[in-house]
Image (cartoon, rainbow, N blue to C red):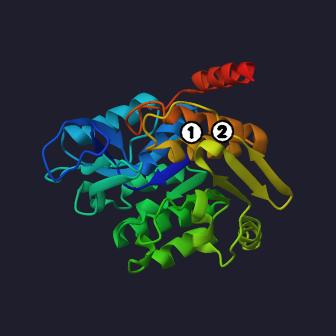
């Protein structure tokens, strides 16, 4: 099977227990939970049986060990995760507002995650890689961007492929160099995985069909538009396939898009039909929201297939 690699932030997430709880005063918290968009992605891919590894950096602390242990348990290659002694593992504190939005307090750029580099371990991991997945959130600094672009170049040079999840807000795109980096990644992309309105961040079109047509015209092989609980739509030059999501009770939405993307890319790499890849991806995204914590909802393939079978039997 083809090996999948990503690079970027590894952190722990600590969550406010109550909706409407503020960080402006003391309150109960849950966590730490292993997290970071590329870590969630690689963890879910590995759980599905896809060879997968991550280039990243953590501190020489309990939070870093928690992440390494979780990824290892899921079957991911952690050989290129550097431990930076004297630096803290990245953190994200999350509060849930009454309007269903979330408020984050991050420490990523100034944590061990900010010390990401293309060292010998990273080069060895990429030497065996067939595919690179890029998260827009992982282009958080010049240093991190350089690693992502170097990974793309290394894999593309030997005929490999690239997937790209923008995973970024419009405001962040205004940061110096961010838009240029995102456009560079998009130009190398084979599988594009935007969520909702992210589709329009890279297109001048005002409707979905026109935006898809414009992006496919740039050389992207396929676009998978994530629509949350409504499911997803697959687009390529042959046509479009829309598939509804699975109905579940949502506990925590964090990481659902990453799990969806990991499942779709893993099965795309296996040559699965778009419908089959979408079905598995929708199921992984649905299962991800049923547990509190970004990686707590990651499931192995047998469990995902059982969930699909049960859901199908009810319809």
Q: Mark 2, mark 1: which one is toward the viewer? A: 2
Which residue occupies 73% across, 24% down? 312
**x, y percent for residue 233:** 72, 51
Q: Residue at x 75, y 37 (%)?
A: 276
Taking the image as drawn, is residue 50 in sight? Answer: no
Q: Is residue 110 left or right of residue 284?
A: left
Residue 299 in picture, x, y percent from top left: 52, 28
| Residue 96: mark in rendering | none
Measured as percent of width and height from the top left, residue 92 is found at 28, 50
Q: Is residue 126 left or right of residue 33?
A: right
Q: Can residue 24 be seen here? A: yes
Q: Residues within 10 Å of mark 1 (few under 14, many from 20)?
A: many
Q: Is residue 47 left or right of residue 130?
A: left
Residue furthest front in the image: 98
State which tag comes first along the sequence, 2 or 1.
2
Report helix, strand or loop for mark 2.
loop
Q: Is residue 113 above or below residue 179?
A: above
> Residue 165's spot in the image, x, y percent?
55, 58
Q: What residue lies at 42% left-to-right and 66% top-to-bottom?
A: 139
Gap between marks 2 and 1 measured at Cα: 9 Å
- Callout 2 crowding tier (Cα within 10 Å): few <14, some 14–19, many ≥20: many
**Disc 2, disc 1: CB below 8 Å?**
yes
Looking at the rendered structure, the secondary structure element under dot 1 is: helix
Q: Which residue is mark 1?
A: 285
Question: Residue at point 64% right, 57% down?
Answer: 160
Q: Which residue is mark 2?
A: 245
Q: Quadrant of residue 193?
A: bottom right
């Amino acid at each position: 099977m083809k090996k999948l690699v990503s690079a970027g932030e590894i952190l722990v997430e600590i969550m406010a227990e109550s909706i409407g709880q503020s960080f402006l005063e003391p309150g109960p918290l849950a966590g730490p939970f292993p997290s970071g968009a590329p870590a969630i992605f690689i963890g879910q891919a590995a759980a599905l049986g896809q060879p997968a590894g991550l280039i990243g950096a953590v501190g020489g602390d309990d939070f870093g060990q928690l992440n390494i242990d979780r990824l290892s348990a899921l079957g991911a290659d952690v050989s290129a995760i550097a431990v930076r002694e004297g630096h803290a593992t990245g953190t994200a504190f999350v509060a849930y507002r009454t309007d269903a939005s979330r408020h984050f307090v991050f420490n990523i750029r100034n944590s061990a995650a900010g010390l990401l580099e293309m060292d010998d371990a990273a080069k060895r991991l990429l030497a065996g890689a067939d595919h690179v997945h890029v998260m827009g959130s992982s282009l958080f600094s010049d240093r991190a961007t350089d690693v992502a672009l170097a990974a793309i170049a290394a894999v593309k040079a030997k005929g490999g492929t690239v997937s790209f999840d923008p995973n970024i807000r419009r405001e962040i795109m205004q940061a110096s160099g961010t838009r240029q980096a995102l456009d560079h990644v998009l130009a190398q992309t084979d599988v594009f995985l935007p969520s909702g309105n992210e589709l329009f961040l890279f297109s001048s079109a005002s409707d979905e069909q026109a935006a898809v047509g414009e992006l496919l015209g740039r050389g992207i092989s396929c676009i998978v538009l994530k629509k949350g609980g409504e499911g997803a739509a697959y687009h390529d030059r042959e046509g479009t396939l829309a598939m509804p999501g699975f109905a579940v009770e949502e506990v925590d939405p964090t990481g659902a898009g990453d799990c969806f993307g990991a499942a779709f890319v893993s099965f795309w790499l296996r040559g699965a039909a778009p419908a089959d890849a979408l079905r598995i991806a929708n199921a992984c995204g649905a299962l991800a929201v049923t547990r509190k914590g970004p990686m707590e909802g990651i499931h192995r393939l047998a469990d995902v297939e059982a969930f699909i079978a049960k859901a199908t039997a009810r319809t």
